[in-house]
Amino acid sequence: MPSVFRFAPSPNGYLHLGHAYSALLNFDSARQGGGRFLLRIEDIDTARCRAEFEAAIFEDLAWLGIAWETPVRRQSEHLGEYREAVEKLAAQGLVYPSFESRAEIARLVAERDAHAPWPRDPDGVPLYAGGASLLSSKSRQRLIEFGAPFALRLDMPKARSRAGDLGWIELGEGPDGQTGAVSAHPEAWGDVVLARKETPTSYHLAVVVDDALQGITLVTRGRDLFSATHVHRLLQALLDLPTPTYHHHLLLADATGRRLAKRTGALGLRQLRAAGRTPAEVRALAGFAAPKAAP
């Protein structure tokens, strides 16, 4: 079977050179290996995602010479599938609602930090410090019926016990040089959020469901997402989904050594194009030679 690759940007800003690197790496790998290349729009963050950014993604990728299969999968059009995944986890007794606000959780973390450093996840965010997992079913139901905001969390100790030992095959490299057969340690993330009252999914859940439904066999993405794979591998096991091979690639940096990112105002592909750069020049800037003909 041919390998299936994907590029999955969020339409919350314009693509920059780092996005071009990831998209070209996936597209070129698919062409050279006789595989398939899919484009996915990860637009569950309705507060930040905008139609003009999505249109710009299509325009920028086409300008680079990248072609993809249609129709394009948009996460916002598949919320029901994510709800079903949450319900499947809940049926296993692995999901519970938490009702603390972000401010309340920050206060709880500060109180614990005052006695001893409270653990952080691989992204540096404090683990969930609340006690909602201890609430009775009646208490939870009463709060939900009252209209209280809530987040649906994965009960990590229970989930970890149910799934057993896990791992994945890494063709790239993690931040500490991890490659080959990698053991998964999702417990480092604590009781992660799977969904919220107003949003029936999270990045972790949606990407796992999407990769399975689209038949992705090789997930090629930035090294900044290596640690998230520990959670993704756990969700795949709990939902009985296939495990793709992973390739976490290097991250492009600017002249100061800072990673290219939308939030830091990295030079966009639209700006490069407006400045007269050609697709071939952008490929070269991203570290790619001229494209080879497909076999």
Image (cartoon, rainbow, N blue to C red):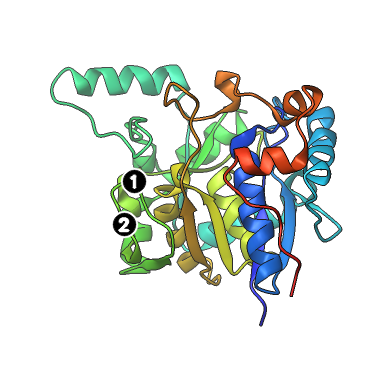
| Quarter of the image with the C terminus in it | bottom right
Indicate whether 132 appears above or below 96. above
Residue 237 percent across, percent down from the top left: 46, 68
Residue at figure coordinates x 38%, y 55% from the top left: 173
Q: How many marks?
A: 2
**Residue placed most toward the observer, 55 or 139:** 55
For label 1, the crowd category at 10 Å Cα-Cα, with few meaning under 14, some 14 to 19 and many 20 or more, is: few
Q: Is residue 271 visible?
A: yes
| Residue where numbered disc 1 is placed | 175
Q: Are marks 2 and 1 in contact (CB under 8 Å)?
A: yes
Residue 235 shown left or right of residue 148 in the figure: left
Indicate whether 89 appears above or below 51. below
Q: Secondary structure at mark 2?
A: loop
| Residue where numbered disc 2 is placed | 178
| Quarter of the image with the N terminus in it | bottom right
Residue 47 shown left or right of residue 130 in the figure: right
**Residue placed most toward the observer, 77 or 69:** 69
Marking on residue 2: none
**Residue placed most toward the observer, 44 or 171:** 171
Kindly indicate the quadrant of the structure image that contains residue 195: top right
Q: Amino acid under label 2? A: Gln
Residue at figure coordinates x 34%, y 61% from the top left: 179
Q: Secondary structure at mark 1?
A: loop
For label 2, the crowd category at 10 Å Cα-Cα, with few meaning under 14, some 14 to 19 and many 20 or more, is: some
Q: CA distance from mark 2 to mark 1?
A: 7 Å
Residue 75 shown left or right of residue 177 in the figure: right
Q: Amino acid under label 1? A: Pro
Residue 52 percent across, percent down from the top left: 84, 28
